[in-house]
Image: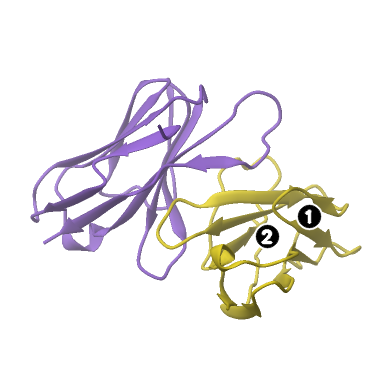
Amino acid sequence: DADVTQTPRNRITKTGKRIMLECSQTKGHDRMYWYRQDPGLGLQLIYYSFDVKDINKGEISDGYSVSRQAQAKFSLSLESAIPNQTALYFCATSDNRGPFTGELFFGEGSRLTVL
Amino acid sequence: DAKTTQPPSMDCAEGRAANLPCNHSTISGNEYVYWYRQIHSQGPQYIIHGLKNNETNEMASLIITEDRKSSTLILPHATLRDTAVYYCIAPNFGNEKLTFGTGTRLTIIP
């Protein structure tokens, strides 16, 4: 089983619908991240959390919200989806023990299409 | 973060060494250089990182110039499975959020 699991892997929805993407991890990491990737482009950071009580906005947080339900779970919500939120979404974790090593562990991605 | 510049694409013959360059001329003395790769639409995979000394692991080698303004990721014996987009990242010291640019699309030619 994957250490970082995202659900759903694929979702097609309509404009205005509320969507939740879920991420769970078994690595025991405190740090979790949500990234978005548009076709042919790099990854943009949406939100990140360094522990259960710590939530921070990334580069492109408008239109998104997150919830850190537990150390192992970090959910991304689109309250009212719009077509330009069609993208590939990645969850990632990193180890909080000791200095930051720069090694992020990514999930397999959730492909979201908003019609 | 230090701005990084990478060629948009490169080809390499299978079995040869793939050398991927990255310029990071604004990097500060205590900022690391990280390399990741993304195969097709999978999540990016960490490869290696370094500060000023050359580094090697089971996946690749990282050569950082003495002035630290550029680096080269070396895949010593490229295989078809190394076809991917490779990202060079140089975050500000203490910045624990990595920003991924558009990287270099490496194609391994049979």
Residue B32 seen in this snapshot: no
Image position, residue B89 (x, y; %) = 64, 57
Do the residues at pointers 2 and 1 share their chain? yes
Name the residue: 71% across, 30% down: A99
Q: B79 or B97: nearer the eye?
A: B79
Residue where numbered disc 1 is placed: B28
Q: Position of residue B83 (x, y in %)?
A: 54, 68
Q: Position of residue B35 (x, y in %)?
A: 65, 56
Check disc 2: other Cα within 10 Å, few if <14, some if 14-19, many if 20+.
some
Indicate the amino acid at tag 2. Ala
The relative height of residue B86 versus residue A71 in the rendered view (above or below) is: below
User: Considering the image in quadrants, where does the N terminus of chain A appear?
Assistant: top left
- Label 1 marks a residue whose chain is B
Q: Position of residue B88 (x, y in %)?
A: 64, 61
Q: Earlier in the sequence, mark 2 or mark 1?
A: 2
Number of disc labels: 2
> Mark 2 highlights which residue?
B2
Q: Is residue B12 left or right of residue A60?
A: right
Instruction: For chain B, give the colour.
Output: yellow
Task: Note whether residue A10 is visible.
Answer: yes
Q: Residue at x 87, y 65 (%)?
A: B65
- Mark 1 is surrounded, within 10 Å at the Cα level, by few (under 14), some (14 to 19) or many (20 or more) other residues, namely some
The answer to which quarter of the image holds residue B96 is: top right
The tint of chain A in the picture is purple
Q: Amino acid at mark 1?
A: Ser
Q: Quadrant of the C terminus of chain A?
A: bottom left
Q: Quadrant of residue B90?
A: bottom right
Label 1: which secondary element: loop
